[in-house]
Image: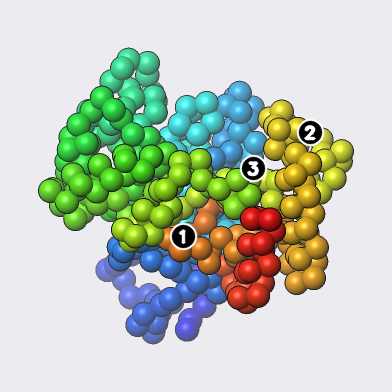
Amino acid sequence: MPNLTWEHVMDDLTPDPQLYNVPFRADEYRGMPYRYVGASGLRASAIGLGTWKFGYPGTGDGARVGEEDALALLDRAAELGVTLWDTANRYNAASGNSERVIGQWLARHPGRRRDVVLATKTFGGMDGTTPNHSGLSRLQIIQSVKASLARMQTDYIDLLWFHGFDDHVPVAESLETVEDLISQGLVNYLAVSNVEHGQLSAYLDVAGTLSRRVRPVAVQNRYDPLNGETRPGVLELSAGEGIAFVPYSPLAQGLLTDRYLDPAAAGPGDRLYDEGLLDGVATAENLKKVRRLAELARLWRVPISTMVLAYILTLPGMGPQIPSSSTIDQLEANTRAGTTALTRDQTDAVHDVFTG
């Protein structure tokens, strides 16, 4: 296969020898396996990148990773085949800044837009304070998507998440609006986030009366194997319905890494410390399990985060993982999970730690 650089503007009218003899079909990209997003035809890297803390800290948006470092992370992610990039319009003080950083990367690499599976969200209040600036009404969804497209400097969104369930808007209205956006080529697939079992069922029921195009292909709820689901039963329903479960905070806010084995060593710059969550998350019971995981990780010569993400990928119904990274080292450790195949005995050993 040719060594593609993609660092040029695509011109469909001009022959490009770099694109001669590309594979007829591919199952991976730059060594990263891809997996189908639920029962859809969309494929995404097994390990993606959560960008929820990308932004402009100097403006007071609360971001942890500024533009220069974020762009370097996106560069490295693209090199590693980590091409599912997950963001939201509201990330970092409802500023839209995570989307803007991604937009800067896409503007610098216009030939690589199709390499990226770009996911963002709509629901939370954005760009104004009237009631029509939030929710899942037709008006709000359309205006929100247009604003996200502008910030990300692109003309389509691959995966649009509903960031929550709107009890005050008919599900049919929300889904019909997405149907229109899909027909216009502005959105390719719909997914939902922060939903209860009954709410996901409602989406599926209404979608069944409208169109397969607005049947959610993925659900993003909080989950990690240490604490389980915050909304019980959604993972099982997703597995049964062919919906990819894409957890956020799969590493328990960073606890399931090598960073907090000694909580006393944590300090400024560490997420749990900075957010005042260290004592509540790094409990004696949790640390006992993390230290046992560390023993297994050392035995198998992988970082804890790599081992945990590889384990999560074996669970029924699990889709791609989107751990966030604030350093290149974290990104590379997370990326290794995509190509780390645990044996049945290893999977059982990790399972026993979490359930013991």
Above or below, comparing residue 166 to residue 351 in the picture: above
| 262 to 274, vertically: above or below | below
Whether residue 313 is visible to the viewer of this picture, yes or no, is yes
* Left or right side of 85 for 214: left
Q: In this view, does 152 lie to the left or right of 54?
A: left
Q: What residue type is labelled 3?
A: Gln
For mark 2, what is the residue?
Answer: 268
Quadrant hosting residue 337: bottom right
User: Which residue carries the number 1 mark?
Assistant: 318
Q: Residues within 10 Å of mark 3 (few under 14, many from 20)?
A: some
Residue 54 position within the rendered picture, expressed as x and y whole percent measured from the top left: 57, 40
Dot in front, 2 or 3: 3
Q: Residue 253 carries which label?
A: 3
Pinpoint residue 171: horizontal percent, then vertical percent: 22, 36
| Residue 142 vs residue 220, the one in the foreground | 220
Q: On the image, which quarter does residue 348 sit in?
A: bottom right
Marks 1 and 3 sit apart, C-alpha to C-alpha, by 19 Å
Q: Residue 64 carries which label?
A: none
C-alpha gap between disc 2 and disc 3: 15 Å
Q: Is residue 332 left or right of residue 124?
A: right
Q: Position of residue 155 (x, y in %)?
A: 31, 47
* Secondary structure of the residue carrying numbered label 1: loop
Residue type for callout 1: Met
Pick whichever of labels 1 and 3 is earlier in the sequence.
3
Residue type (three-letter) at the residue carrying disc 2: Pro
Q: Which residue is drawn at 79% across and 41% down?
A: 284
